[in-house]
Image (cartoon, rainbow, N blue to C red):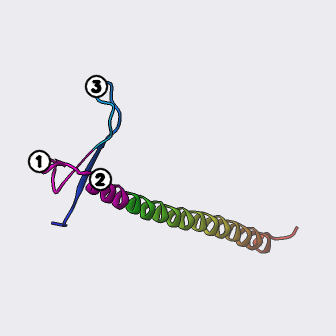
Amino acid sequence: MRNTQIYLLKLNSPSDNALRLWTGRSLHTLRHCSGKQMGSALETMQKKIDALQESLGILQHVKDEFAWTSTARVRETMEQNKAASKRDTPLD
């Protein structure tokens, strides 16, 4: 199993007007973070979010390229079929 770190972030709630952050290797081992740990944890989470956004951008680019290529290929095939049908149609 991977060496996974879990972060649980709790924002303001009606009963508690404070930011809380817990961290641990599993849900059963979560502990409150100190101020220093909180800064480090938030920095780590931001890096992971940035990496995820970059990956999503790459996937979107690949999706767009694939869609454009597929559309171009469909047009090309349709034009080839149209040209072939004109050649095969006997003239009266």
User: Marks 2 and 1: which is nearer the front?
Assistant: 2
Which one is nearer the viewer's eye here, 22 or 66?
22
Is residue 48 shown left or right of residue 60? left
Q: Residue furthest right?
A: 92
Q: Amino acid at mark 2?
A: Met
Residue drawn at (38%, 61%) of the image: 48
Image quadrant containing the C terminus = bottom right
Q: Which residue is mark 2?
A: 38
* Element assignment for label 3: loop
Residue drawn at (86%, 70%) of the image: 91
Percent across and percent down for residue 58 are: 51, 67
Mark on residue 15? 3
Q: Which residue is mark 1?
A: 28
Q: Amino acid at mark 3?
A: Ser
Q: CA distance from mark 3 to mark 1?
A: 23 Å
Among numbered discs 2 and 3, the one appearing first in the sequence:
3
Percent across and percent down for residue 2 are: 19, 67
Q: Residue furthest left?
A: 28
Image quadrant containing the N terminus = bottom left
Mark on residue 18? none
Among numbered discs 3 and 1, the one appearing first in the sequence:
3
